[in-house]
Every structure is written in C-alpha cells, then in structure tokens.
Amino acid sequence: MRVLFPSLCGILLIQITCSTTCQKNGPGSQRAVNPFQQWLTNTGDTASVTVHPNDLPVEIGYTFTSSAGGSVVQLGIRLPDTGRTYAVTLWDGVSKASLVQKNIKVATMGFNYVSLVATNEAVAIQANHSYVISVLMIPQGLVGAGPAGDDFFDVERTDRKDIFPMTIGPITYQHQYSKPSGSASPVFPDNLTSYQNFINGICDIGFSSN
C-alpha cells in the first residue's frame, strides 16, 4: 500500500483550469464561495496540480472553520479519473457525526460540484466551529470493485510555502487529515497530515454566509 506523501516519480503535470468560483445558488441572494477552487484561481501559475498515483483505499479531508454563520450549499471534488463517482462527506469536526454525504461524478478534469439547495440538504454552519470535508478514494458503484484506491491530485506552491491555513472569505481550511478505509463506506479522517505545503485531494465546499 502507498502512504500519502509527495510523489516525485511518474507525475503528470496538469494545467490548472477552474470554472466560475462563485455560484448564485445559496440561501437568499448570497453567493456561494468555493474556497479551494478560488484559491487555485487566485494563485495561478504559483501553484501546481499533479496526479498522485495511488492504490491505497483512503479517506482524505480538510478541517475548516467559518468566521461567520452561514450554510454549506455545495459539495465538490476535483479528481483525475473522469467518469467515476466518489462519496464526499461533510462532518462535524467535534462530534465526528456525518452531516451530509453525496456521491459526485467526475464529469470534467476541473471542479465538479453538487447543489445541496436543490435537494433541501443545505447544512447550517456555526461560526468558529470545526468541520471536515472529505472524499473517499474508492470509486462508488463499480461492479467487482474491491478495496483499492484511485489516483488523486497533489497541490503544491512553486515557492514551497505553506498552503494551509488557507483563508478565502469567511472560510479557513486548516489541516489535512486522512484515514485508510477497508470498505466503500466513508470514514471520519482523523490522522493528521504533518505537512502544510503539500495538499492531497481535492475536495471542496460551497459556502453561503447568512
């Protein structure tokens, strides 16, 4: 099994292509902020996104807080294997309870989001409370699929400076966590990743302030 660490061999450099960073689909007339997508758009050529070959069935996630109350109105991923579907979960970072989970299909090499508003599943977010957004790197619904992992992306700044903590608007992504999984069911990722300048993933939220 492969552990999560920066891979220097067999890496395919992917050009960063991001779609619109905000969508007007949150509660009321507020615009949803997609923090990781917006950060990549803002950093441009100063960040690289590369494919990380992976065979470890693992949950990868990030803790985050908000400086203001609001709602998570989208869940999203950016992963290299188009056509596959992955389970993305929003967790309470304190109780470790699952707040909402959606299966998201990778339709494009860019970010793919699903709306929680459309299904009346938007999650209220308390200011200064810890939450976790994570993706299970086992494709969902494949006939005969065993507990084998799929490739993911690595994100790194070209100046090697830390990526986390990452603050976009009221949202701050703080740390990366992971956890090996032996099944196709999401698990709370509680193994802290020691490095902050190299991020595996990618998963993201859409947040709308009150």
Image (cartoon, rainbow, N blue to C red):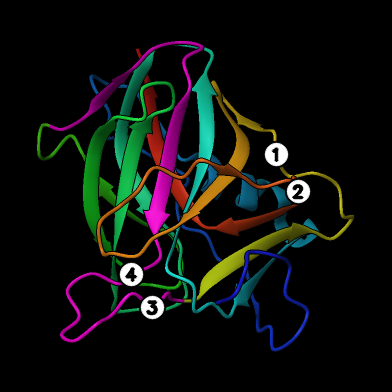
Decide whether residue 80 is among the magenta residues.
no
Which residue in the protein does label 4 denote? 106
Residue 85 vs residue 46, the one in the foreground: 85
- The residue lying at 65 percent from left, 84 percent from top is 12
- Quarter holding the N terminus? bottom right
Residue mark closest to the camera, 1 vs 4: 1
Q: In 3D space, how far apart are the residues under numbered discs 3 and 2 (Cα atoms)? A: 25 Å
Q: Which of marks 2 and 1 is nearer the N terminus?
A: 1
Q: In 3D space, how far apart are the residues under numbered discs 4 and 2 (Cα atoms)? A: 27 Å
Amino acid type of the residue tagged 1 in the rendering:
Phe
Amino acid type of the residue tagged 4 in the rendering:
Val
Which residue in the protein does label 2 denote? 195
Q: Would you identify the image quadrant in which residue 48 lies?
A: bottom right
Q: Which of marks 3 and 2 is nearer the N terminus?
A: 3
Residue mark closest to the camera, 3 vs 2: 3
* Range shown magenta: 121-150
Label drawn at residue 74: none
Q: Alpha-carbon neighbours of circle 2 within 10 Å: few (<14), some, or many (≥20)?
A: some
Q: Where is residue 186 in the image (x, y as percent from the top left)?
A: 30, 52
- The residue lying at 20 percent from left, 80 percent from top is 142
Which residue in the protein does label 3 denote? 148
Q: Which of marks 1 and 4 is nearer the N terminus?
A: 4
Q: Alpha-carbon neighbours of circle 1 within 10 Å: few (<14), some, or many (≥20)?
A: some
Q: Position of residue 82 (x, y in %)?
A: 36, 78
